[in-house]
Amino acid sequence: MNTATKLSGFALGLATVFAGAYGIGHVAGPAAPAAEIRHDTTDTDHDSGTADHGETGHGDGDTGDGDTGGAHLPGGLLVSERGYTLQPVTAPAGEFAFRITGPDGAPVTRYDVAHDRRMHLIVARRDLSGFRHVHPELAADGTWRVASPLAGPGVWRAFADFTPTGGEPLTLGVDVTVPGPLAARPLPAPATTATVDGYTVTLTGTPEPGRTSRLTLTVSRAGRPVTDLQPYLGAYGHLVALRQGDLAYLHVHPEGTPDDGRTPAGPAVTFAAEVPSAGAYRLYLDFRHGDAVHTAEFTVLAGAQPAPAPTTAPTPDAGHGTPGHGHS
Ligand SMILES: [Cu+2]
């Protein structure tokens, strides 16, 4: 694929977007805050080795050594990190429950609010279908409970994205199996347009491994730009990216906030995202409009692809109903 051409086209598109965005409000005071707000664990600078150095005092910012090696694990790959462990607990049918145990082995009961909530629970099947982002309730004993977001059989990855009080942001992940017939769901082919709930969302930009890339998502409905997006968890959009193969987790928040006096309420929401490697990713954009939260999904390919995408949707003439055709 001609990556250079794609990227330069992307850059042109962004220039237009930013010119428009900055034209709307006057930027007063100091330079706009660094736009990138991530609470994935790539920021936290803890290696995958011994997890006993919980107070190293790193701030939220990346220390910026810019390495592309394996020193920084993306979030969500570990069930236990820095002494904190994600433990699903038995729950009644229709409910999902878990605890986070801390370095002392006891369930954590104190959390900082991040993006309006103390706990963000994201789930997706291992095949990247079934994405949900929900907010459990904390019981006094440290158990988090929520109506189960696991919509049907499959092997699910559940990500707990949180900040323990006195600690640093952390995303832990655990597999949860829901028994039942397993349906093969190939990763949808890469696309720059998604439709959800009557909205059309267009993606501009391509993530580049190991560096920050701008991704702009533009929302329209019935052919008209949506310019009255509603704030959702303190932003006009939340973007989660999951890497195909291991479900490495990135959670990105957009440039600008609803109350900063310069960020328009759509139709475009721009994110600064960094993916940790080449590969296929599924992007999930949560946005709020009409008093409901909608999720638009995209498959994107980052970096040089070693081969055609490992799984793609069958082409329309690929033989509907041909058993065994799904091997890819
Ligand atoms: Cu959340």
Image (cartoon, rainbow, N blue to C red):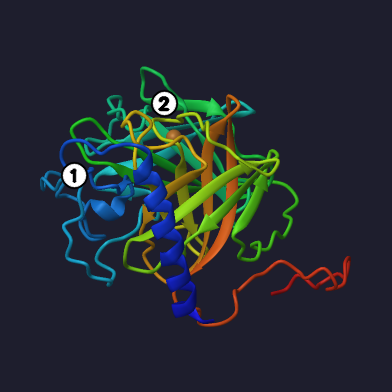
* Alpha-carbon span between mark 1 and mark 2: 42 Å
Task: Please tell me in which quadrant of the rendered image residue 114 appears.
Answer: top left
Amino acid under disc 1? Ala
Q: Residue at x 23, y 70 (%)?
A: 67
Does 191 appear above or below 319? above
Q: Nearer the viewer, residue 283 or 73?
A: 283
Q: Position of residue 173 (x, y in %)?
A: 43, 48
Left or right of residue 282: residue 34 = left
Helix, strand, or loop for circle 1?
loop
Dot 1 or dot 2: first in sequence order is 1
Task: Locate the C terminus and report the quarter of the image it occupies.
Answer: bottom right
Amino acid under disc 2? Thr
What's the mark number on residue 143? 2
> Which of labels 1 and 2 is toward the front?
1
Which quarter holds ligand 1? top left
What's the mark number on residue 31? 1
Does 10 appear above or below 238? below
Task: Locate the N terminus and report the quarter of the image it occupies.
Answer: bottom right
Q: Nearer the viewer, residue 269 or 51?
A: 269
Q: Is residue 126 visible?
A: no
Q: Give neighbour class at mark 2: few <14, some 14-19, many 20+ (Cα, 10 Å).
A: many
